[in-house]
Image (cartoon, rainbow, N blue to C red):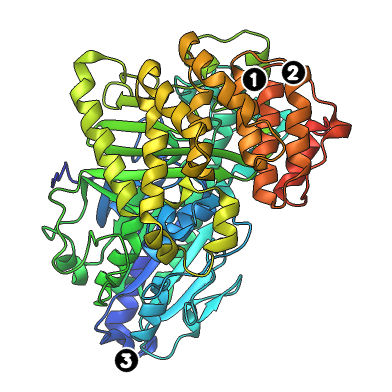
Amino acid sequence: MLVLKRPLRGLMAPWMPVVVVATMLAATAGLAAAGGERSQQERPNIVWLMSEDNSKHYLRLFDPHGAPTPAIEALAAEGVVFERAFSNAPVCSVARTTLITGSHAPRLFTSFHRRLRPVSLPEGLVMFPALLREAGYHTTNRRKEDYNTRVSPGTWDDSSGEAHWRDRAEGQPFFHCRTFTSTHEGRLHVGENRLTDGALNTGPDEVRVPAYAPDTDLMRRTTALYHDLITGMDGEIADFVRELQEDGVWDNTIVFYFGDHGGVLPGSKGHWRDAGVHVPLVVRVPERWRQLVPGGATGVRTEAFVSFVDFGPTTLALAGVEVPEAMDGTPFLGSGADWHGRDSTFSYQDRFDEKYDMVRSVRVGDWKYVRFYQPQQADGLRNNYRDNMLAYREWRRLAGEGQLQGAPAAFFQPRPVEGLFQLAADPDEVDNLAADPEHRERLLRMRAVLSEEQRRWPDLAFLPESVLERNATGDPAAFGLERRDQIQRLMEVADLALRPAAEAAPALAAILADPEQGRWPRWWALNVAVSIDDPTARELLRPHLLAHLDEQQHPLLRGRAVEALAVWGGDAGELLPVLLNALSATEHAADSLVLLQTLVLLRDQLGFDPDPGQVRPGTGGGEVDRRLSYLAGEGE
């Protein structure tokens, strides 16, 4: 669907005086000073400018409650504002891997942040700058990569803190990627002195707190500080544009500005809401290349859906380079691009640092369907890095003291198996319509759309990360295709959670009672059993869960059986020794992380009190140590 809204009028570029000076110099001295060949360049230069960790909600260009960003607004006056642009993942390494490959992360085993080990790309798929470089472009990245895959040979001429387009050959077109770190989440890890009236340029009463978060003075001050950071980032964008103009390349350069995923305040980055994936996107297109915009107009806004999986293919199309069939995305700019029918996006999350939370969603127009594969755990289950932010710490404290109600309280409570949200009326996604009979048909239709997409990839995350680490890093996509039937079977078992408990329980019992079903169908049956709340269904399943506490069972199966029995009201004295024994038997860091997360859930959500001295995973290091430090009481 193509929607061109009102032109962007009255937006004055902060670099306009520079343009005037450059024009005067060109009139008197000609273009030779910039390089005669360069003025005859037949392909556009392309620049990506990424700001870290900010959703579209922090820029007034996209949201009336956002901060003014005159430099970005000036880009918009010469280009297109994409009001519905999405990262496919709410966290950096997964989002950036999707960008650089033009492919969905769950089919490449790149949806876990951060990788425990980098994986290889499948045959026929390379990081798209390598294709630009092969076609004659000079490709540079300054400086952040953070990919979950091995870098394709020939991707960059330079990827470093000094990378610059100026190092190219005379007249050579360039692709340059630049990340601005001034809006990163870590910039909000400050003391209270940084949040005082005298330290803030934005007033706490000028900002909006989303409905899912507590509207406290500290939350407002933290939001105000972030608005200040957005304003500072915009100044960096202005400086960068001046550099392009002073080099005489501005009139031949297409500029993308976007956030590298959503965020950054509590409940957004790393979470399933649009606040974690709905990014600002502006593409400035110089006059000589406006035929590459559908309709040929600039200074416009569109509601066409675009997502990170499309950015690489779009950049290739703008450069006149063929898009490989191995990429999942489609161009939204370039010769032959069309915005009609672009009305949907998919998003995904699996592991965020030490925290697992498998969530998949599809948005179509203003409707969004969300599938929670671990509904027993709260959105706010402990993730150490988040708690470096004072506002996050306050939110957790208020919840623990019982001072919250409604959506802010729900952040620290178990979730439903699925959600359905109407974002036009409920932009903060707090009114779940999944159980509303009036919307049943839509729910089933969107559920089917998401399921079909997962089968098409296929979605590797239905297998434990440790299994993928051992078997899939050489060519994850081929591994997934070879095991498509197995993955589909695991999806079918997981989808038993969508049935009424009275229907699901007999099917789960049959799977758990039959060793011939295999290990991982039984693991998913245990996953589903955790969220069963019907007393009769629980009694049917209980002996099968107890049987999976046996030491002969895989540690992951024992751990999930413990989790289900604990959620059902089991005794800590009986269950904790089983979990700790399973943890000590792990042979892979990913398995240790899964079981440590169960331990955190039992402690924080159910009140179990494990002895930190007895928590001894079979493997350690990295993310495992984060969990151990938390359980030991460090940093609380």
Nearer to me, 437 or 40: 437
Residue pointed to by mark 2: 572
Nearer to me, 552 or 116: 552
Query: Circle 3 sits in a helix, a strand or a loop, which is it?
Result: helix
Nearer to me, 283 or 311: 311
**What's the residue at 55%, 62% (across, down)?**
471
Residue pointed to by mark 3: 36
Q: Label 2: few (<14), some or many (≥20) within 10 Å?
A: some
Nearer to me, 397 or 158: 397
Query: Circle 1 sits in a helix, a strand or a loop, which is it?
Result: helix
Q: Label 3: few (<14), some or many (≥20) within 10 Å?
A: few
Q: Does any portion of residue 221 appear in the rendered image?
A: yes
**What's the residue at 65%, 21% (across, down)?**
396
Q: Does any portion of residue 350 appear in the rendered image?
A: no
Q: For the residues marked 3 and 1, what is the alpha-carbon distance in whole angstroms?
A: 74 Å
Q: For the residues marked 1 and 2, what is the alpha-carbon distance in whole angstroms?
A: 7 Å
Reading the chain from its start, which is encountered first: label 2 or label 3?
Answer: 3
Q: For the residues marked 2 and 3, what is the alpha-carbon distance in whole angstroms?
A: 77 Å
Q: Residue 28, which numbered label?
A: none
Q: Label 1: few (<14), some or many (≥20) within 10 Å?
A: many
Image-based side of 132 in relation to 422, left or right:
right
2 and 3 marks in contact (CB < 8 Å): no
**What's the residue at 60%, 18% (across, down)?**
567
Q: Is residue 473 above or below residue 586?
A: below
Residue 129: x %, y % from top left: 41, 74
Q: Amino acid at mark 2?
A: Ala
Query: Circle 2 sits in a helix, a strand or a loop, which is it?
Result: helix
Residue pointed to by mark 1: 566
Q: Amino acid at mark 1?
A: Ala
